[in-house]
Amino acid sequence: MPKIVVRDVFRLSVNNSTIKLQVKLFSWLHYYSLLALSPQISTMGITSRCVGDDLNSHCLFLDYDDCMYSVVKRDVKLCQKNYDMGTAVILRSGDADYNIVGDEYSNYHVIFCQKGTFSEVCEIVGNTHADENFRLVPIRFNYRTYVLRIFPKYSEDGQMLKDIPKLREVVFAETGRETNLAMYDFLRKYYGVPEWKGMYIPNLDTLPELGVIHYNTTMGWNRTFMLKLKSMFTNIKMQLNGVLLCL
């Protein structure tokens, strides 16, 4: 997890959506902790669980925040090669930026319609560069499923922060795995994914129901948090001025 330490005088760390800051000067020590990204905004998403499957199968989901597209594509190829995962649908959530050599940089969702056990899916997710919080959700919250957002994300004052994810690319691959009918139909109808043809025709199950849930998500770096951050640094400045006056 991100951490910055400067000779025990300044410590900054980000842990589970919490920013922690410790400042030490001579005998003076001050500690701050801010919950920066608390889940307060309701939105809607799909679940990886294949509804109605007697074997409790799951589709493979991957979620990337602030990631290079080349990293996402490499993970997709490795999943297809090492785990016999078939065709992958890559969605982009939000606008894209580009680095100095022109590589795309954004937030991405990846959906494989192919089925696996929950433990198998967890293993695959853990071997990718997917967002750490996404990888640890089933462990921390005991959801026993992965969730990807399909509804817009709004700020605390009703402004849209992110629209629904948009189709970025379909990476076709052959597989011997069975494919979930509900997920396959959903991707084609909701995101405009083309029908899989030729050697990529999926071996579909007969399960038509898709898992959809309402859940709370973070609202990003909102105005309330920025005011708290400003207040924190103002307090630090006042404390440091007091220490210096006593020298």
Image: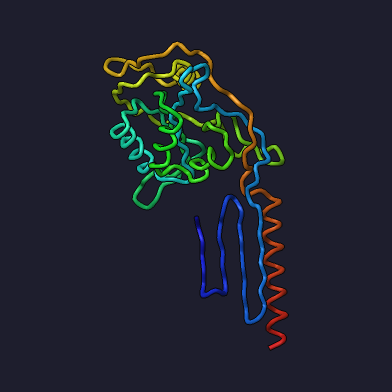
Where is residue 197 shown, x and y percent of the image?
31, 15
Q: Residue at x 43, y 18 (%)?
A: 180
Where is residue 234 shown, x and y percent of the image?
70, 68
Residue situated in front as seen by the camera: 20 or 237: 20
Where is residue 58 shown, x and y percent of the image?
46, 26
Q: Quadrant of residue 228?
A: bottom right
Q: Residue at x 39, y 14 (%)?
A: 204
User: From what the image shows, is residue 162 above or below residue 243?
Assistant: above
The answer to whether any part of residue 148 appears in the image is no
Residue situated in front as seen by the camera: 94 or 208: 208
Residue situated in front as seen by the camera: 157 or 173: 173
> Viewed as shown, does residue 94 lie left or right of 223?
left
Q: Residue at x 38, y 42 (%)?
A: 127
User: From what the image shows, is residue 91 above or below residue 126?
Assistant: above
Quadrant showing the C terminus: bottom right
> Viewed as shown, does residue 141 lie left or right of 87?
right
